[in-house]
Image (tube, coloured by chain):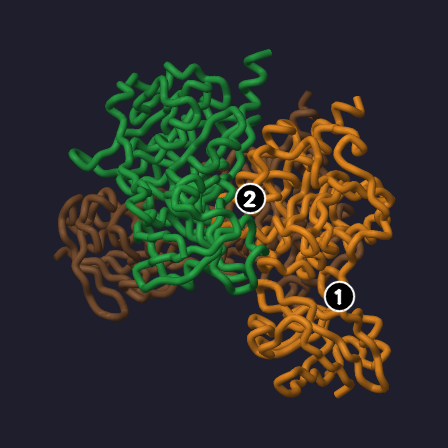
Chain colours: A brown, B green, C orange
Amino acid sequence: MVEKERQRGLITFLSDYGMRDEFVGVCHAVIARRAPCARVIDLTHAIPRHDVRAGAGVLAAAAPYLPQGVHLAVVDPGVGARGALARRALVLRTGSGQLLVGPDNGLLMPAAELLGAPSEALDIGNSRERLRPLSHTFHGRDIFAPVAAALAAGAPLGSLGEPLEIASLRRLELPVARLAGATLHAHVLRSDGFGNVILDARAEQVEELGVSLGEPLAVGYPGGELGARFARAFADVPAGELLLYEDSQRLLALAVNLGSAAALLGVSNDDQIELRRA
Amino acid sequence: MVEKERQRGLITFLSDYGMRDEFVGVCHAVIARRAPCARVIDLTHAIPRHDVRAGAGVLAAAAPYLPQGVHLAVVDPGVGARGALARRALVLRTGSGQLLVGPDNGLLMPAAELLGAPSEALDIGNSRERLRPLSHTFHGRDIFAPVAAALAAGAPLGSLGEPLEIASLRRLELPVARLAGATLHAHVLRSDGFGNVILDARAEQVEELGVSLGEPLAVGYPGGELGARFARAFADVPAGELLLYEDSQRLLALAVNLGSAAALLGVSNDDQIELRRA
Amino acid sequence: MVEKERQRGLITFLSDYGMRDEFVGVCHAVIARRAPCARVIDLTHAIPRHDVRAGAGVLAAAAPYLPQGVHLAVVDPGVGARGALARRALVLRTGSGQLLVGPDNGLLMPAAELLGAPSEALDIGNSRERLRPLSHTFHGRDIFAPVAAALAAGAPLGSLGEPLEIASLRRLELPVARLAGATLHAHVLRSDGFGNVILDARAEQVEELGVSLGEPLAVGYPGGELGARFARAFADVPAGELLLYEDSQRLLALAVNLGSAAALLGVSNDDQIELRRA
């Protein structure tokens, strides 16, 4: 009964493969061969190429909504590298029983922390589930997808690789917003497809500035300074106006009602944003 | 038996979320948690942002091909607005037993009419199926997807919200092609990804102009006038030439064989197109 | 038992429909009506519009990874044409029991050869599974998807159309790399979404030039000549440098580490590429 349940396992899949090629589809095909009854949910494949931090951020943002299952994530600039540049290939089990599969470059760790923290880790670089011949450029197809499929089909975790120390896993260094005097120094984590600019700050930090919902504030950015309103929803400000809001992942973000804050501010990832009472 | 059938329910999903972000994937994840056995078919997520009319048109065009199930559609410029600007969140049941879920801004109505007309409506804005905390910007994830999943999992309709009068539902005002003398005054409904320009007119109306298949006609557009041929298929005119044809949704459309009519004519939604015998 | 197995059939789907419209989603809906239990894997829908050869190449590249099932592929510039321009609509069964569905314009043949060679062919242009009314522009929805769904649902092959001679099927003419003296004359098959330029040559042919892994070589292209390195993986050369590598489909390809070879070389499909020892 449990076995049957596992054979119908669920896999979520995030990558930077894009949808212009067959890479994602071929990974689905590989999964279907190993785990014919598994379902695969594409979280997104539009992570900017090789942007491990953006991938980690999006996976962490999705973490609270993930069903129980296997979470496959591939943003892997080090694929096929050897020697000092090589990265390991991982499966993690978390405290809540979730399984994550992907490269050991920090991609999986913020989500793993939110899913109960990693409690068990395996190096799957030489897993018996690997496809042969193994390519040097497409480990999503040749290592990560087959191992995720094997897990979804009920293969025991221990059979898939060699145990690793949790302390040895690579972690990302992420910016942290901080309050200094009357200014909240935040950073651009990423922009979404609608031009909303996501910051590394939380609503509590704006409230510490003494700015309440509905009140104006000043937004400093590399190109200058603009006024904005701390609002609940886009439609709470007139069309074309800048607002600061708590986004659906509970992070602060800048938006333009019916427009693009990313285009208005011309900001890039990691740019500093300074928020002050107006 | 019926219960089992419903638990394997089918959900179709249309939105303006695009594929550049994880929004669609997170909605799939939310559905999988509430309705593990439901299947989800993505109709399209490339509706132009906030273009409720385009979303309504595409959903109506797909309506004749939809399997029995729950049809989730989210194009929702009013998300999170309060007071006079607020829109309700809806489930509709139609005469043919189809279920539609989405905002009460007219998006669902043209498809609902084609599916047997709405026979029952509920306000699900405070549904017990909502996620908590409820965001102000992502009701697709927090209200619409969970309610669609609950329906696919077999939850009784009446348990999901408060009954509404059908007469109170918002409807869109849509342009209508009309024949005046020797001219058919039509409008651009939308252009598709291949540059085909879809009009609000039907083949019968061109025949009323006295133009038969294979015959030439004149096409007036805001930038001037061009000759075209009333044809069955792209390949019936030489490469690069303009044609008028009955598209796969039985609407008239302008196309350029192996090219783009939208680029040739430079037209936008709602632009007037005048068709005459050449 | 076998019947039940077939009813849970698997369909892969490749096309040039793009994701900007509802075309792919409507085909999924049509499949779900005819074969409610079939699973559909989207291989890719980003084949350049009407590029039959690119579609054939991508399908062939995916062939070794395809699960047993029905493989639906639609790149169909001749849709709706009549008379001499008309193309037939096909189902092929291959020696390994795979089923392919699509237009008879060469699209299916390279993959069919890799899947055991076509052993049985049917003309499905007038199949009883067609939707009615039949459009002239969207046979993916009206012929190919319904027939693929019928096969996935267990319909006997012979019931779906009229037998055809294998020898009568259209095949593509494809370029072939050849060694002449100290030069390997290759051609651009296509570029992928990352700007990697895929050639019609194999690693053995470079080794015949006397170039081993890690060694430099000269790359002649229509705009000039550049140095490159024959490498295993992107990360084996410095950022921004050109490399020649065996790609994940075991074809030779040119890439720029953390960049785009297609942009660097400015090449188009069919352009000649000359490889020599440096």
Q: Nearer the viewer, mark 1 or mark 2?
A: 2
Element carrying mark 1: loop
In this view of the protein, which residue sits in the foreground, B127 or C92? C92
Task: Work out which quarter of the rendered image holds the C terminus of chain A and state it.
Answer: bottom left
Subunit ID for the residue under disc 1 = C
Q: Is residue C218 left or right of residue A189?
A: right
The answer for which chain carries disc 2 is C
Label total for image: 2
- Which residue is pictured at 67% across the width and 61% down the height? C54
Which quarter of the rendering shows the N terminus of chain A?
A: top right
Depth order, front residue of C112/A206? C112
Percent position (x, y) of residue C8? 70, 29
Residue placed under numbered mark 2 in the picture: C24
Q: Residues within 10 Å of mark 1 (few under 14, many from 20)?
A: some
10 Å crowding of disc 2: few (<14), some (14-19), many (20+): many
Q: In the visual, does C9 lie left or right of A198?
A: right
Residue wearing tag 1? C251
Residue at image position (43%, 37%) is B59
Please report whichever mark, 1 or 2, sits nearer to the chain's N-terminal start.
2
Give the left or right position of residue B226, taking residue C77 as reference: left
Amino acid, disc 2: Val
Q: Is residue B163 visible?
A: yes
Q: Nearer the viewer, residue B262 or A106?
A: B262
The one nearer the camera, C252 or A216, is C252
